[in-house]
Structure formats: C-alpha cells, structure tokens
Image: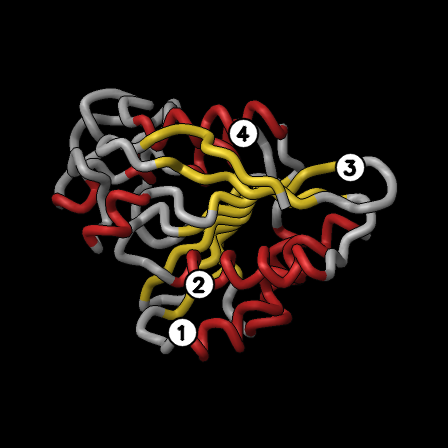
Amino acid sequence: MESSAVGYTVQGRPIELQTLSPRAGPVRRWVLLLGSVHGDEPEGVWLLDSAMREWADDYLFRSTGVAAVVCANPDGRRARTRWNASGVDLNRNLPTRDWTASYRHKGNNPGPAPSSEPETRALLATIERFQPAAILSIHSMRRYQVNINGPALEWGRRLAQVCDYPVTEDIGYPCPGSLGTYAGAELQIPTITLEVQRGLRRSDVLKIHSPVVQAAVAFWDE
C-alpha cells in the first residue's frame, strides 16, 4: 500500500491518500473511496481503514485499483464537527453549477466561494489525478440509504442487495455544491453516497457494511 498527502487542512493536518493496485497486471480503472467528509460521521473511517488494511494483506481485485481518502476532513474529525476548521460543510463547497452562498442551517455553510477550502481542492485534485471509474463516499444518517448520482443505478442496486438498504436518487433535501452533484450529475462519474445507519456500534458497522465496501469495488472488477 502506498500513502501520500494529497493536501493539507485549514489547520495544517495532512489529508492522506492510500492506494492499492493488483500485483499482477496493469490497473485498468480506479475506484475512489472517501470517508468522513463530515467529521462527526466516523463510520467511513472505520470501514475504509479496515478495508485498506485487509486488502493490503490480500488484494482481491484483478484489474481495479483502489484510491482511498480514509478521512477527508481531519480537522472536523478531530473536533467531532460536521464542518471543517473554517466552519464550512465540505459537501456543499464543490464547484457545481447550482452552488449558492445562501444556506439555512449552520451545518450546511457552503463557504465564501466554490472550492474555497483546501480539503475541497485536495479532493478535486484527486479526482483529476485518478479519473475514477466510480466514487463511493461513506456518510451516516438516520434515513440509511444507497444514494446514487450519475449513471450508478445498477451499481447501487448491487450494493443494496448486500445491505438491504433502499436505493434513492434524491436524498430528501437540496444539496447544492455536493459531491453527488459535481461528480455524478455533472461529470457523469457513477457516484454513490452510502448513508450508513447512524448510531450503530463500530463492530456492527463493520459487520454489516464491510461486505458493501468490498462489493462496491468488486462490481467494477467484473
């Protein structure tokens, strides 16, 4: 497994990228995995840290590489806040056509301008570098679901078979400046936001959802 910093947070913490690729043969495509875009949602860190450690010992995929930002918001993760150290919701800060500076709730502050945050710019650089075939971003909420954007319906249905979550195309409220809109709807990269059921113990999150993360990559390795 190779590790490097793809950028640094508002407070100067490194944003770590981990990559794994098949031991024999070239990488035909990359899948990008993201955890803890919202710092108060640890489920993505639990799942991706576990998956990358397991795959480092026994890589399962024949032609697909995995690029993982296990924690996309290290400052928020440390402070246990949804937003970054500037108080910006990173999942409202992407340069989408529908980005707006207006917001109703503190937790959805989109920042002063699209891509204003260093964490967002690190994510954009990662997408540009790997040109991923698909993106899986792991969040959590009470209304657990497999939320799809872009051409991701078949992929989403496959994951739903593993965790028995509903597949949705609308998360239930507007999300201007979100990754789903930017990567999925606008760039047409199949993008899934896996909304893990919030409140589960770490052991239950891993038991239920580790097979989902594995299936997410395996789908593109077929």
Q: Position of residue 100 (x, y in %)?
A: 24, 26
Q: Position of residue 19 (x, y in %)?
A: 61, 42
| Sequence-earlier tag: 1 or 3 | 3
Q: How many neighbours does mark 1 have within 10 angstroms: few (below 14), some (14-19), or many (20 or more)? A: few
| Cα separation between marks 1 and 3 | 32 Å
User: Where is mark 3, residue-wise?
Assistant: 27
Q: Label 2's element?
A: helix
Determine whether label 4 and label 3 are within 8 Å by CB: no
Q: How many neighbours does mark 3 have within 10 angstroms: few (below 14), some (14-19), or many (20 or more)? A: some
Name the residue: 58% across, 24% down. 129
Q: Nearer the viewer, mark 4 or mark 2?
A: 2
Q: Nearer the viewer, mark 4 or mark 3?
A: 3
Name the residue: 22% across, 33% down. 11
Q: How many neighbours does mark 4 have within 10 angstroms: few (below 14), some (14-19), or many (20 or more)? A: some
Query: What amino acid is labelled 4 in the image?
Result: Ile
Name the residue: 54% across, 45% down. 68
Q: Position of residue 134 (x, y in %)?
A: 62, 41
User: Where is mark 1, residue-wise?
Assistant: 202
Determine whether label 1 and label 4 are within 8 Å by CB: no
User: Where is mark 4, residue-wise?
Assistant: 127
| Sequence-earlier tag: 4 or 2 | 2
User: Where is mark 2, residue-wise?
Assistant: 46
